[in-house]
Amino acid sequence: MIVNRIMFRKSWMITLIAVMVLSLFQFLAPNTPKANAAVASKTIVGYWHNFENGSGFIKLRDVSPKFDVINVSFAEPTSGVSNGTIGFTPFNYTDADFKADVAYLQSQGKKVIISIGGANGQVQLVSTAARDNFVNSVTAIIEKYGFDGLDVDFEGHSLFLNSGDSDFKNPTTPVVVNLISALRTINNHFGTNNFYLTMAPETFFVQLGYSFYGGSCISCDSRAGAYLPVIYATRDILDWLQVQNYNSGPITGLDDQYHNMGTADFHVAMADMVLTGFPVAKNPNSLFPALRPDQVILGLPANANAGGGFTSVSEVQKALDALIKGVQLSSYKTRGSLTGYPDFRGVMTWSINWDKFNNFEFSNSHRAYLDALSPPVTDTQPPSTPTNVTATSKSATSVNLSWTASTDNVAVTGYTVSYGSQSLNVAGTTAAITGLTPDTSYVFTVKAKDAKGNLSAASTALTVKTDAASTGGDQTAPTAPTNLQVSAKTATSVSLSWTASTDNIGVTGYTVTYGSSTINVTGTTTTISGLTANTSYQFTVTAKDAAGNVSPGTNVSVTTDAQSGAQAWAPNVSYKVNDLVTYGGKTYSCRQPHTSLVGWEPSNVPALWQVK
């Protein structure tokens, strides 16, 4: 965000006119039909990491059932920023297993959406050729893995406005025009009724457009408000907008006051801007129309590690009370409706992985809050009967089963495998039954259970005879990893390497533990991020073989670096309160956590930096 003294000199006449027309925005908005049926009356969206960054890796089928929509993040450019070709390779998965997990979530009524971009995946559709590459590659990814839709998470310099491109309703900048064309082409290919289109811009690209618009202002960042023409041009097919209410600088609301991250005040003010509409760059002749309440979701970090602007559960729910129930805050009154928006869509979090890291505080707390807004659904319909129950492998003491997923009008939440007087509850469509007697016949049946506790009929019985007892089985553990070393470290991360273990049947992976955290890796190196500066950690590495035998552990202790002194300010860096930087020969102290952008230099944004 650019803070320019000239730009902040307000014309009281323009401001007065803008305030007078705010109450008319709801009526000025086009009559926009709903783009898609709701996943749930109150939706929780979460981003799932297709990478490892210290928050822990989660298989898709193990995602908390509290989420309605899982955004797989991220698909990224394969041939540079401006080529337009997007690629996606599942992390820590085979293609077949990844597709199976996508289908499993969909069998539970969840929607799985591919998200494109992210902080490291900048995309600029500078030409029609780049646009066509984007359309073709994204369409292929969606069809290959069976995704339910597309989430646009363009960050950094993906979107900007050329000088003179001042009308958000009729943009002329190629990266904007080509993105709009691409999204409509992809949506038309899949059809509105079964395809989800969502967006997750930063506040810089949406709400900042009330104060500055990149194509029309002098000396401000050309990216300011650059998502507005994209949102406007796709509002008829847009399922929801989930602005990232984190890693943001202070933003001016419709009350012409700055609002700072991490409070109910910030979330209500930011949501109210898109629920009410606003004059772009405070020009009363350029009104960005309101979105429907069911098109708006609050974007939130799951915990303090996930991004600047973490907000406590109580503050988030205070904001939801104001937005949904009309329980107004003392610090900010909603402009569009003082009685609330009962159809407000819900909440999004970055991320599912950080939510699990934080013991599911986000998903558990907000699912309970949102569910309490609607009366419970009476459901007596059981799921369909599981079919194709098959023994995929067996030994003298174990049998592995698989079956085809059941369907249900609400959602299948799990299965019960019964054999004799025993039963086993599982979440997915596979089960490993152990502790069996050698050379013995067992009869297995499977029932499905839905969210309301209804049980399906039992599957067709499957009889399996365990193998005869053998003295052969593998009970030999791998050797302990050796030469465990710290190959690099910073204030917040440690990189480890070690010499591979050996085993009689083959090592399948390694487990790194530290404190209460665990990371599984397949190679002999890993980087653990999200650590605390100047803190001692003990890391233990063990090896595991195909039979599940675990080696003795190898330990190494290391102390993370102390937080460094003042460094030269740079864009695209995550700064915390009290971080020191140098710029223009002066030293500045960070006043608010944020991720820096070009134009947010310390001398330009006193709300973020204080000169020492």
Image (cartoon, rainbow, N blue to C red):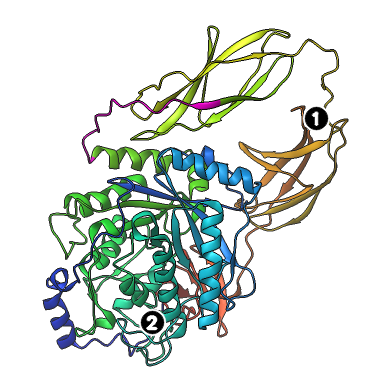
Task: Name which quarter of the figure residue 196 lies in.
Answer: bottom left
Q: Which mark is residue 3?
A: 2
Q: Position of residue 269 (x, y in %)?
A: 26, 63
Please tell me whether mark 2 sits on a helix, a strand or a loop. Answer: loop
Residue drawn at x 25%, y 33% is 377
When the figure is inspected, residue 549 is found, relative to residue 512, above or below; the finding is above
Q: Nearer the viewer, mark 1 or mark 2?
A: 1
Task: Name which quarter of the figure residue 297 lies in.
Answer: bottom left
Position of 392 with respect to 579 (left or right) is: right
Q: Position of residue 552 (x, y in %)?
A: 80, 30
Dominant secondary structure of the residues highlighted in magenta in the image: loop
Position of 592 with respect to 516 (left or right) is: left
Read off the magenta span.
Answer: 373-388
In the picture, the quarter occupied by the N terminus is: bottom left
Residue that mark 1 sits on: 552
Position of 192 with respect to 583 (left or right) is: left
Residue 157 appearing in the image: no
Q: Earlier in the sequence, mark 1 or mark 2?
A: 2
Residue drawn at x 28%, y 39% is 371
Residue 43 appearing in the image: yes
Please tell me whether mark 1 sits on a helix, a strand or a loop. Answer: loop
Residue nearest the observer in this picture, 327 or 91: 91
